[in-house]
Image (cartoon, helix red, strand yellow):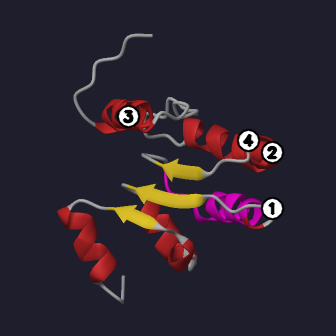
């Protein structure tokens, strides 16, 4: 498929594909939910991950533009904890909020916030 690469998810995927090419590794496997803000696509992704993480056995798991849902986050996180090899965890955009709200933020390897999100993460009372 041809996708316009300007920002957001297409930019993230393009950067990941280019990086994989430079490193000489397989391109990333990608799961897109097509969520437009109602949470339906995000729920499908959460469900798929809880049902398939052992089969997928990712080395790296990047969450990008998923609708934050603490219950679903925790279900996926508990599945990650059951994996033989825990993947590196990266949370971008709203997903780092749910990681913080869940209490599992210290388990993540990288947050990639913008300036406004940095302020939220720095606020201990948030």
Alpha carbon distance from label 2 to label 1: 16 Å
Marks 4/2: CA–CA distance? 10 Å
Look at 67% across and 66% down and name the residue there. Answer: 74
Q: Tell me whether the residue at label 1 lies in contact with that at label 4, contact meaning CB atoms closer than 8 angstroms.
A: no
Q: Position of residue 22 (x, y in %)?
A: 38, 34
The CA distance from mark 1 to mark 3 is 28 Å
SS of the residue at dot 1? loop
Of mark 1 and mark 3, the one earlier in the sequence is: 3
Q: Residues within 10 Å of mark 4 (few under 14, many from 20)?
A: few
- What secondary structure is marked by label 3? helix
On the image, numbered disc 1 is attached to which residue?
84
- Magenta stretch, overall SS: helix
Which class describes the residues within 10 Å of circle 3: few (<14), some (14-19), or many (20+)? few
Q: Which residue is mark 3?
A: 22
- The answer to whether residue 20 is left or right of residue 61 is left
- Along the polypeptide, which appears first: circle 2 or circle 1? 2
Mark 1 burial class by Cα count in 10 Å: few <14, some 14-19, many 20+: few
N-term mark: 2 or 3: 3
The tag earlier along the polypeptide, 1 or 4, is 4
């Amino acid at each position: 498929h041809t996708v316009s690469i300007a920002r957001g998810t297409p930019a993230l995927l393009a950067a990941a594909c280019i990086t994989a090419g430079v490193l000489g590794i397989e391109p990333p496997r990608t799961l897109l939910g097509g969520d437009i803000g109602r949470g339906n696509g995000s729920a499908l992704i959460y469900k798929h991950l809880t049902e398939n993480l052992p089969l997928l056995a990712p080395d790296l798991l990047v969450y990008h533009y998923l609708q934050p849902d603490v219950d679903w986050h925790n279900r996926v996180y508990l599945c990650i904890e059951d994996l033989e090899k825990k993947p590196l965890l990266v949370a971008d955009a709203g997903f780092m909020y749910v990681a913080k709200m869940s209490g599992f933020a210290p388990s993540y390897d990288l947050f990639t916030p913008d300036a406004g999100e940095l302020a939220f993460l720095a606020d201990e009372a948030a």
